[in-house]
Amino acid sequence: MIFRDPEDTIVALASGEAVSALSLIRISGKNAFSIADALFSKNISGASSHRAYFGDFIIDDKVLDECMLFVFKGPQSFTGEDTVEITCHGSSYIRREMITAILGKGARMAEPGEFSMRAFKNGKMDLSETEAITDLIHSETKQQHAMAMHQMKGGFKKELSGLRQQLIDFASLIELELDFSGEDVEFANREDFFQLLKTLDSKVVGLINSFQQGNVIKNGVFSVIAGRPNAGKSTLLNALLNEERAIVSSIPGTTRDVIEDTLSIGGVKFRLFDTAGIREAQDQVERMGIEKTYASIAKGALLIYVFDQQETGLDKVLADLEKIKFDPGRTLMVANKADVGEMEFDREEVLFISAKEKQGIEDLKAAMLAKSQVGDVNNDALLVSNLRHLKALEDTKESLNEVFLGFERGISSDLVAIDIRRALFHLGEITGEVSSDDLLGNIFANFCIGK
């Protein structure tokens, strides 16, 4: 992302390109009000902030549309700047003409994420909060929404800012001691300092450990449906999705490639992968499909092993699973075609279903949810789901370890202070108290235009 003049007034469609009943166009910057005045039937430059006005959008003395115009005066706005939001009818023609007219009055098109960038630059939110906006926009499940909302409401700030400030204070005192090194004085209480380090280390470790849960909630549980040919894998995929997503045939080896789709169970997103049947390949194409099956299993978080209970005994199923070498704790053994009668298996964990008749599907979904071990998202608990945050936390942990080791080994305070500052640096990377244009460019380039 190329950073352009922050003094520019910017405009973008904030509601997406799809035809809809209504659309939202956002203008932000020092000339937002004067531009709106030039095109709107009512004068809003002297208007109070956080007010809505109904009127006409006029181009060349002709009314383009009736619309609502919302006024937000900086710094009490999303970006911290004077902002106008126009709600118009959702015609692509109307949107295009409005934006063209606004550009003609001196605004420029916003870059992806530029509104959020300005909010960050103007201190309206920290970097982790702005990143949560993207997660919120893309949330598809209750769990994803809860996690994104908690972070957007300042989860990291609440969790770490107080401890970070205390660490800054202690670091300052330790560095002050260096100015009096010849007088053998201590300004920083070592006992209190060690307790702070332990508390911060515990918080950081807890956040690092939360990444597994957070990552699964954000990206979904990678769930592989595997088994021998004609076991009913594709029929099961269709039953889970309640639609004809995969081709079903009695001919073995019909599925040659991996078919992917998503499913929400109990607020948790599952990424389902229907794979080619595992057997000795009959041709090169099937061999490639089976190779993809094993590759998918290797990346999977959950294995749903489907077998035809009428054709495949439990001993063969266990032998197949032994060859696959997938974690038994994350494996579901699913006996299909139970509509013709259930076989006797000396294994309580075998689930009986009929994918064709959609019997036992709800029990299977419950078992999938239990095996995922995602758990509920506590509204007060912060979960790490961002790889950038995880890396910063791991670097913080490493620096804290160096601080502990430094004191244990009697290393001079000036060297310990360096490690403390390094830990502070990495903590600051999360919220944006420490950042670079390259980092910000990479983050905001992934945002939607208009946000």
Image (spheres, rainbow, N blue to C red):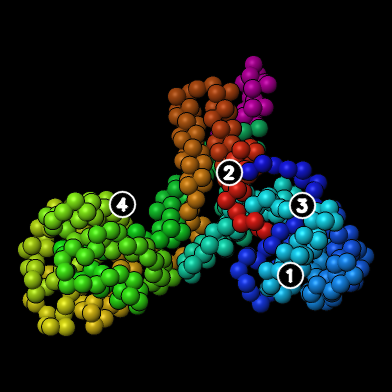
Q: Quadrant of residue 306?
A: bottom left
Compared across the picture, whether 443 is left or right of 356 comes to right
Q: Amino acid at mark 4?
A: Lys
| Location of residue 154 with respect to 434 vertically, above or below | below
Contact between marks 2 and 4 (CB within 8 A): the answer is no
Contact between marks 3 and 4 (CB within 8 A): the answer is no
Q: Amino acid at mark 2?
A: Asn
| Location of residue 95 with respect to 340 vertically, above or below | above
Residue at 64% across / 27% down in the picture?
175
Quote the CA–CA distance across marks 2 and 3.
Answer: 21 Å
What stretch of residues is rendered in magenta?
Answer: 173-190
Residue 94 is tagged as 1
Along the line of sight, the residue nearer the viewer: 287 or 72: 287
**Sequence-wise first label, 1 or 2:** 1
Contact between marks 1 and 2 (CB within 8 A): the answer is no
Q: Amino acid at mark 1?
A: Ile
Element on which disc 2 rests: helix
Mark 4 vs mark 1: in front: 1
**Sequence-wise first label, 4 or 1:** 1
**Sequence-wise first label, 1 or 3:** 1
Q: Which image quarter holds the N terminus?
A: top right
Residue 442 is tagged as 2
Residue 137 location, x and y as percent?
Answer: 57, 63
Q: Quadrant of residue 105?
A: bottom right
Contact between marks 4 and 1 (CB within 8 A): the answer is no
Residue at 62% across / 29% down in the picture?
174
